[in-house]
Image (cartoon, coloured by chain):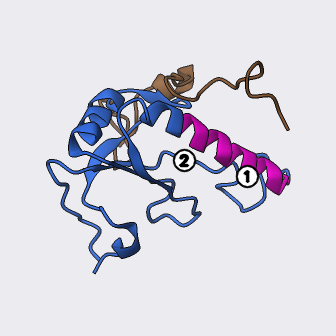
Chain colours: A blue, B brown
Amino acid sequence: CSRLHTKPSVSPTILLSNMYQRPDMITPGVDAQGNPIDPRKIQQHFEDFYEDLFEELHKYGEIDSLNVCDNLADHMVGNVYVQFREEEQAATALRKLTGRFYAGRPIIVDFSPVTDFREATCR
Amino acid sequence: SRSRSKSKRRSGFDMAPAAPAMLPIPTAAGQIPGANPAL
């Protein structure tokens, strides 16, 4: 895969690039200062993120699917895919999120061609 | 279980970057725009 994916001009799905950052993103189970992190804290951190996200996004429309890439590898790290019921709702979300910040980092938002996450692998 | 009503955490949305993050962002080449590398 060249990873040069086409970005559709409209889609029910939006991609928030690299939005989720694990507290142990540098070394698994260890924070940036080198101290071990309780796995429950990592889980709580993720749940807080998910809750923030859901509360913000459901203002813009009905969410069919909300996928967070909670991985440590470079590829797709922290990507969030949000599939709305309607393309129009996704367009509203894209418009409303563009130029804003989450936890001190800019939100990078685009439409995503993915509409079926079981078939989302790149061929 | 924790109370959802009173001790609501502040959302991370619209949390602006801390001051150091406002410095010029290095380009892909790792250079600060406008700054000439010492030759």
Q: Secondary structure at mark 1?
A: helix
Q: Which mark is residue A43?
A: 1
Amino acid under disc 1: Gln
Q: Residue furthest left?
A: A9
Residue at the (45%, 28%) spot, across then down: A101
- In this rendering, the answer to whether A113 lies above or below A14 is below
Q: In which quarter of the view is residue A44 placed?
A: top right
Q: Which residues are magenta?
A: A36-53
Mark 2, chain letter?
Answer: A
Callout 2 crowding tier (Cα within 10 Å): few <14, some 14–19, many ≥20: many
Disc sitting over residue A20 in the figure: 2
The percent coordinates of residue A35 (x first, y second) are 85, 50
Left or right? Give the position of A98 relative to B15: left
Which structural element holds mark 2? loop
Residue B17, magenta (yes or no): no
Image coordinates for residue A105, horizontal then vertical, percent: 49, 34
- Identify whether B37 is placed above or below B35: below
Residue A32 visible from this viewpoint: no
Total marks drawn?
Answer: 2
Residue shown at 29% from the left, 29% from the top: B34
The percent position of residue B28, horizontal first and vertical second, equals 34, 49
